[in-house]
Amino acid sequence: MKLYLFISFIIFLNTPGFADEQRLRTAFKSKNGQYTIKLNKNKWQLRNKKGKVLYSIPDNSYTSMTILVSDNGENLVVINDFVEGFQFQNRIGLRFFNNGTLSKNYMITDLIADSCNISQSVWHSSWLVEDFGFIKSDSSFSIATYEFNEFEFDTKSGAIIKKDKPQAFDDNTVIVMTEFDKHEKTDSVSLKIIKQISGISILKNGSIISTNAYGQGRWRTILMIKNKKDVTPNRFRNKIFLNRCLS
């Protein structure tokens, strides 16, 4: 029992969505360090390394969000990854800017199908895995939601290029929030199904699956299971804890 409480406490502390402090950010840099965007009164100014202002965008509570700047300084993505409060209706999740002009935005409800698939703290809510960023020489932008949907966007236009489940996902795969006891001498565990997130219902309470990704103890986590085997991608493993809509 003591081991279970200790593990639960560690998971609680390290789970995205449980930090209960406000966020205040006023400056962001491109990955190559050549460009900086900084809040100045009611607008964000993008400067090059010499300090020249190239363009600006109006502020819209971005201090609680994350702004990513492409290495050429031309493209910005504003991610509402720290949603203040619990209301998702009419909240923008992503904004794409090209040379200071808004090219596209997406409501959070455009990107998640079920508003129960989020994490909540006293102060904020979160809905996407914290490994978002530019890819393919900054021409694309990638995010992954708590529903195991992986999106790629065109950085300049903001258009969706791809939306898929992880590569291993197929008709024999299910994504569930589950609880199980793990023993050192076996990889087999008996599942308690707390919530099904995706896939055809092929598991029930007491289903036996194989996983070698966990040590001894009691675990509450989200697994992607295929043919009774844990195939959860590293991008998602132990990075999501859903606590909304649970009785």
Image (tube, rainbow, N blue to C red):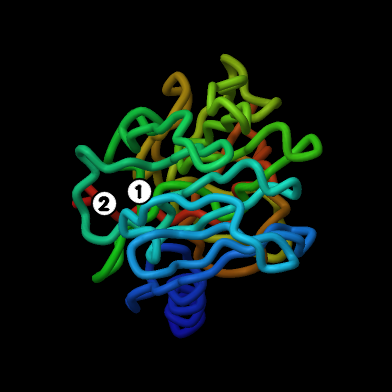
Q: Residue most toward the front?
A: 52
Residue 13: image location, x then y, percent: 46, 77
Residue 137: image location, x then y, percent: 80, 38
Secondary structure beneath dot 2 equals: loop
Q: Which residue is mark 2?
A: 244
Secondary structure beneath dot 1 equals: loop
Q: Residue most toward the top?
A: 171
Say which of 177 and 122 sits in front: 122
* Left or right for 193, reference 137: left
Q: Which residue is mark 1?
A: 118
The kind of residue tagged 2 is Arg
Circles 1, 2 touching at the beta carbon (< 8 Å): yes
The kind of residue tagged 1 is Ile
Spatial CA span between label 1 and label 2: 6 Å
| Image quarter hosting the N terminus | bottom left
Say which of 247 and 215 sits in front: 247
Say which of 55 and 244 sits in front: 55
